[in-house]
Amino acid sequence: MDALADFGAAYTKSLNENSRWLDRNQKTVGLTRVQSFKISLSKLIIDQIDTLLAQHYGFTEEELDYIINYDIKYRMGLSGGADDGDE
C-alpha cells in the first residue's frame, strides 16, 4: 500500500507544520519544552487515510461515514462539549 505510506508521510508533515513548541520553567527540573499539536488542522489527511483503509477492509459507505463523524465528534473535539480541545 504505497498510497498509505504517502498519506502517512503527509500526515506527519502536516502535524509538524501545524504544531508549536511550548516552553515552561519548572521549579524542580528547570526549563522543559513540549511540542503541542493541533490535530484538527490535519483532518483532511486523516479522512483520506480513513477512506483508503475503508476501501482496503471493504467497509460500506455508512461504516466510513460513522468513522469520519466519530472522528469529528470525539477526536477533533468539535462536539460542543466543555471538554473539547485537541491539544
Image (spheres, rainbow, N blue to C red):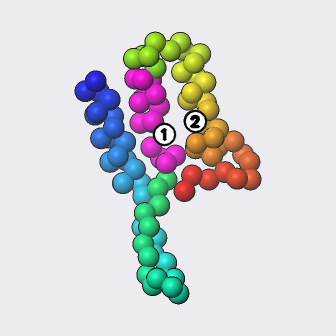
Q: Amino acid at mark 2?
A: Asp
Q: Identify the residue under disc 1.
A: 43
Q: First in sequence: mark 1 or mark 2?
A: 1
Q: Residue 35 is drawn in which quadrant? A: bottom left
The quadrant of the image that shows the N terminus is top left
Exactly how many numbered labels are in the figure? 2
Residue 36 drawn above or below residue 69: below
**With respect to residue 10, does 53 lie above or below?**
above
Q: Residue furthest bottom?
A: 27
Residue at (54% x, 21% y) in the render: 64
Q: Who's the residue at 70% across and 53% down the image?
A: 83
Q: Which residue is mark 2?
A: 71
User: Is residue 28 left or right of 55 when viewed as pictured?
Assistant: right
Taking 70 as reference, is 60 left or right?
left
Task: Residue at the far left: name it.
Answer: 2
Please tell me whether mark 1 sits on a helix, a strand or a loop.
Answer: helix
Principal secondary structure, stretch drawn in magenta: helix
Residue segment shown in magenta: 39-53
Mark 2, residues whose alpha carbon is within 10 Å: few (<14), some, or many (≥20)? some
31 relative to 83 in the view: left or right: left
Residue 10 in the image, given as x and y percentages of width and height: 32, 40
Outermost residue toward the front in this view: 28
Could you say which disc has been placed on residue 67 in the image? none
In the rendering, at what x and y percent does residue 73 appear? Answer: 64, 38
Judge whether residue 23 is colored magenta.
no
Q: Position of residue 32 (x, y in %)?
A: 44, 76
Q: Amino acid at mark 1?
A: Lys
Q: Residue 18, percent across and down?
A: 41, 54
Label 1 to label 2: alpha-carbon separation? 9 Å
Q: Quadrant of the C terminus?
A: bottom right
